[in-house]
Each structure stands twice: as structure tokens, then as C-alpha cells.
């Protein structure tokens, strides 16, 4: 077992393990941690705890210190610097007539680098833009092209359900989403209704999929012959999340349709009457 703390960077959802280096750190405290890009400001999501050794990526980087008031002032200063850099970069993009959209700017904690995130339909020659920005800010400049799903995660917003974007609040990674998932959830296949603000299939189709699969497995599907308390019939409607089925019993011209809990019916195998 290895003792770690879990931290989040900025408004990110993903948690990373760091060695507390003997410090007792509580959830919610700000910390300075050592990363591959140098020291960074982060927030502890979960205090000291033990995890299995195979869950830790070696070498495990450590906590430098619990953030001081001066560290918090530095972080706030960097946020202000980011806003200034965003405005300047956007003007420079217009001056150079580049087909790109600036999404976000992040300044490293020690001020040694400014990272600009942007979207574009294709490749963009931004070499002159980098030169201009470097001459203005006198630090290392990095431009990084991202996809539209990443843009939605960084910018945030409200989804069609009225809640904040899943990707911006709790989903740590993007996973593959397919039309098949929408079909299994009995949703309209109208792309406008199953797509998020980013224009791609909604992330919730994926993280709800396992529940749907389990409920579908336990619920007789449409067309199945089942035995009910009122006799043998055929399922004409199945609602897996409610755990109910509507079954047609009787003969053609003199049949009834009744709703049952799935626990009250049993599927009749095809090779049996």
C-alpha cells in the first residue's frame, strides 16, 4: 500500500495522486505540487489515504508544501495575467488573419510558460503569432490545438437537461459514445436531440449505458412469449428502467393488454410451449 493524496488542477474533474511527503493534508486545502512542467497550484480532493501499489504511476511525484497566503496571491495574479493574455492573443489572431478560435489561456504557477488552447478546422501556421506573444510576455509560449469536446469541457455551460456539462463537472475522461447506446435507451435518433453543445453525441449516453444494459437484460423484450398470472401472452411494450412490461394475452379479436412487473412474468423458451 502507498500513502497518497488526491488533487485536482484548476476546475478539472480528474484526480491525480501525489506523495504527501509526511504532511497531513485535508480535502479542500490548496497545495503546491511538483509536476513534469514544474511546481503547480492545486486543490486537495481527498486527504491522506492508502491505495494499492499498482494504482500508482511511478515515479510518484510529491507535494512541495501546503499553499501559503503568498502562493494564493500568486495564483490570483496568474489568473489576472491569463485574462490579459487572452485579450492580447485574440487581437493578434485577428491581425494575422488566422482561422482559429482561442478557447482558454493558462499560466504556469512559476510564470515560466503561458499555454494557449485553441480550436481550428485544420492545421494553422501560428509561428508568427508565437513570436509576437513571446516578445510581449517575455516567457515561453505554447499553443495547443484541441477538439470541440475539449472546448466544451474547458468552457463549460448548461446542457439540454438544465444541468452543467457532465464533462466539465465530474467526468474525468472522454469515452466512446455510439448510436447503439441511444437505440438501447429508446431515444430519438434525431441528432439534434442526442447531441451535446459540442455537436457530438451526449456523454450521458455512455455513463448511463451500463445501467440500461443491466435493466434490459433483466426485462423481457418486445415480442417475447411470457407466462403471466393471467396466462401466456406476448410482450408488446417493455420499460426496463421502470421494470415493467405490457403483455397481450388471449386470442386475436378477443385479447387484453395488461401491465406487469417483470418479476411477475417469466420468459417461455422457444423450444417449449
Image (tube, rainbow, N blue to C red):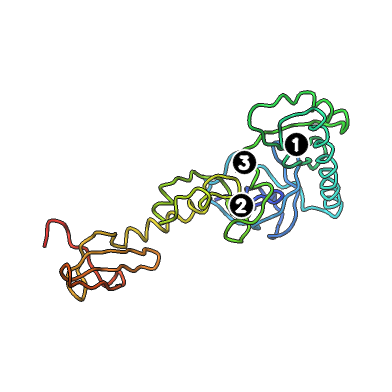
Q: Indicate the quadrant where residue 211 lies.
A: bottom left
Q: Report crowding for label 2: few under 14, some 14 to 19, many 20 or more residues within 10 A (C-alpha).
A: some
Vertical placement of residue 141 versus 271, above or below: above
Q: Nearer the viewer, residue 129 or 259?
A: 259
Q: Which residue is mark 1?
A: 115
Q: Secondary structure at mark 3?
A: helix
Mark 1 neighbour density, 10 Å: few (under 14) some (14–19) many (20 or more): some
For marks 1 and 2, the one nearer the N-term is 2
| Image coordinates for residue 153, horizontal then vertical, percent | 64, 47
How far is the residue under mark 1 from the one under mark 3?
Answer: 18 Å
Residue 166, placed above or below residue 114: below
In this picture, residue 156 sits left or right of residue 114: left
Q: Is residue 81 above or below residue 158?
A: above
Q: Which residue is mark 3?
A: 148
The residue that disc 2 covers is 3
Residue at 66% over, 48% down: 19
Spatial CA span between label 1 and label 2? 32 Å
Judging depth in this view, the residue of 17 and 153 nearest the camera is: 153
- Kindly give the residue lying farthest to the bottom in the view shown: 230
Count of number-bearing discs? 3
Q: Is residue 101 left or right of residue 214?
A: right
The quarter of the picture where residue 163 lies is: bottom right
Q: CA distance from mark 2 to mark 3?
A: 37 Å
Q: Nearer the viewer, residue 3 or 169?
A: 169
Amino acid at each position: 500500500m502507498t500513502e497518497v493524496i488526491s488533487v485536482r488542477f484548476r476546475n478539472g474533474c480528474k484526480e491525480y495522486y501525489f506523495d504527501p511527503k509526511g504532511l497531513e493534508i485535508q480535502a479542500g486545502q490548496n497545495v503546491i505540487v511538483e509536476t513534469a512542467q514544474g511546481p503547480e497550484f492545486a486543490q486537495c480532493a481527498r486527504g491522506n489515504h492508502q491505495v494499492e501499489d499498482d494504482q500508482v504511476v511511478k515515479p510518484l511525484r510529491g507535494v512541495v508544501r501546503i499553499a501559503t497566503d503568498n502562493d494564493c496571491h500568486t495564483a490570483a495574479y496568474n489568473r489576472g495575467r491569463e485574462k490579459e493574455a487572452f485579450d492580447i492573443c485574440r487581437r493578434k489572431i485577428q491581425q494575422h488573419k488566422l482561422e482559429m478560435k482561442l478557447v482558454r489561456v493558462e499560466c504556469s504557477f512559476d510564470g515560466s510558460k503561458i499555454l494557449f488552447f485553441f480550436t481550428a478546422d485544420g492545421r494553422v501556421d501560428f509561428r508568427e503569432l508565437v513570436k509576437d506573444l513571446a516578445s510581449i510576455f517575455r516567457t515561453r509560449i505554447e499553443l495547443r490545438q484541441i477538439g470541440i469536446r475539449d472546448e466544451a469541457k474547458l468552457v463549460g455551460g448548461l446542457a439540454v437537461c438544465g444541468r452543467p456539462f457532465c464533462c466539465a463537472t465530474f467526468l474525468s475522461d472522454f469515452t466512446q459514445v455510439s448510436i447503439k447506446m441511444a437505440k438501447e435507451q429508446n431515444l430519438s435518433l434525431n441528432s439534434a436531440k442526442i447531441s451535446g453543445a459540442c455537436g457530438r453525441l451526449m456523454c450521458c449516453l455512455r455513463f448511463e449505458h451500463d445501467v440500461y444494459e443491466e435493466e434490459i437484460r433483466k426485462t423481457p423484450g418486445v415480442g417475447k412469449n411470457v407466462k403471466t398470472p393471467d396466462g401466456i401472452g406476448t410482450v408488446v411494450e417493455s420499460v426496463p428502467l421502470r421494470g415493467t412490461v405490457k403483455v397481450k394475452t388471449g386470442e386475436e379479436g378477443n385479447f387484453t393488454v395488461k401491465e406487469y412487473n417483470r418479476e411477475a412474468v417469466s420468459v417461455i423458451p422457444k423450444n417449449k410451449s
